[in-house]
Amino acid sequence: METIKMRKIQQVFDDKKVGNISETIARELESIHFDDMVKPGMEIGITVGSRGIQNIQAIIKAVIGEVKARGGKPFLLTAMGSHGGATAEGQRKVLEKYGFTEETMGVPIKATMDVVELGTLENGLKVYFDRIAYESDGIIVVNRVKVHTGFKSSIESGLHKILAVGLGNHKGASLVHALGVKGLKKYMVEFAGIILEKAPILCGIGILENAYDETYRLAAAAPKDFKSVDMELLRGCKEILPKLPVADVDVLLVEEMGKNISGTGMDTNIVGGILEYDPDEYTPPNIKRIILLDLTDETNGNALGMGQADLITKKVRDKLDLHATYTNTITATFLERAKIPITIDTEKEAFEVALKTIWNLPGTPPRVVIIRNTLKLDEAYVSEPVWEEIKTRSDIKPAGEWTPMAFDEDGCLMLKV
């Protein structure tokens, strides 16, 4: 293989972040008259989902503290749809991975797959909702607001989604996804609307993160303001959304993927694969070959999203939990995202296969990019043609000298981000 020179770079993103999380939570809740919502003795569920959210423990602890300060009895609600193998115990284990236990949080954790029926949409779809949540005295909805991995709209992932999908449990999540991405885009907000009318929703906390995964903004919302807060935070998300350093890539090496990184393992907003969008709003990247090197420990073998890759290593294949992957994928209805790519023994061999199949003219230097995952894009390795394109940009800085693309004796990539 001809020597390919790589250089580490830094992308400079907006690094504004919340200074004091507990104070911000207290101020936000006060702004929506939280004192009027919580009465002594009320048993109040606080949602925790299955995404990797920076500072989520601090955020949830702050909410717990505000409930206790008003005499409420808080508990944590698993709000994961079909994740965790679509079982209550599986969802508890997901929370443990993120450090959520009854010991660390000081409150009970309640999980069930049982649901109640709250109503029916005009198209006949029934609205299901977590039984424990419904039977509580109140629910505080906490979720990150971000771009969805399947469609583009004014409301994507956020407070509405965790109501309709997360607290719908397996049965509700399956119905929300039943009509595919167009149905999800159209009906998710309608599902959440009925839930807001019928379930004891007290308020919501929307979380916006910057490109460094730090808490960029926290916003409390009364039930009547869920739409406006979801829309406002999503607009902010799109403004600060990180991207690959270039849109045209011959070979993209992704060191890891998993459900803690994105609902699709590798964020489709970064690597491509959005199924429903307005061309005026979104332009997908042009990536010829994607190589996936590993799964995160937190994903527990759930490899939904691996179908976006062209090549995986044997290490990835050996970590697959097909039951968890298929359960989640079938619920989401995007079967192509769980297709198992060509499996190659080593990372070195996978890279060689990728170079042979990018259809470049002989002698054309390949445009290669290496990233850790689709959440961490502030650092990357790029090959010479990519560097030549970006080297004069103010948001790009060199972070190292030129080094050859290298693999160790076991065929493992040595240039780790």
Image (tube, rainbow, N blue to C red):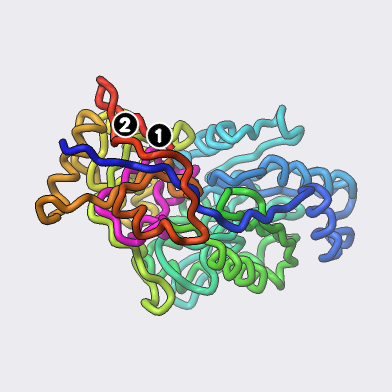
Is 349 or 406 nearer to us in this picture? 406
SS at mark 2?
loop
**Residue depicted at 43% across the width and 35% down the height:** 296
Q: CA distance from mark 1 to mark 2?
A: 7 Å
Q: Residue 383, position in %: x, y?
A: 31, 47
> Is residue 203 toward the left or the right of residue 250 in the image?
right
Residue 267 belongs to magenta span:
yes
Q: Which mark is drawn over residue 75?
A: none
- Assess disc 2: are there few (<14), some (14-19) or many (≥20) residues with their C-alpha within 10 Å of its C-alpha: some
Quadrant containing the C terminus in the rendered view? top left
Q: Residue at x 41, y 71 (%)?
A: 282
Badge 1 vs badge 2, beta-carbon distance below 8 Å:
yes
Q: Position of residue 137 (x, y in %)?
A: 76, 53
Q: How many marks?
A: 2
Magenta-colored stretch includes residue 232: no
Check the image and name the residue furthest to the top: 409
278 and 167: which one is in front? 278
Which SS type dominates the magenta stretch?
Answer: loop
Residue at figure coordinates x 40%, y 58% from the top left: 390
The answer to whether residue 175 of the structure is visible from this angle is: no
Q: Amino acid at mark 2?
A: Leu
**Compared to 7, does 160 lie above or below?**
below
Q: Which residue is mark 2?
A: 413
Report the disc number at residue 416: 1
Could one spot residue 415 in this view of the protein? yes
Give the amino acid type for the residue marked by disc 1 in the picture: Lys
Please name whichever residue, 181 or 292, is drawn nearer the observer in this view of the structure: 292
Tell me where the magenta segment starts and ends, as one range. 244-273
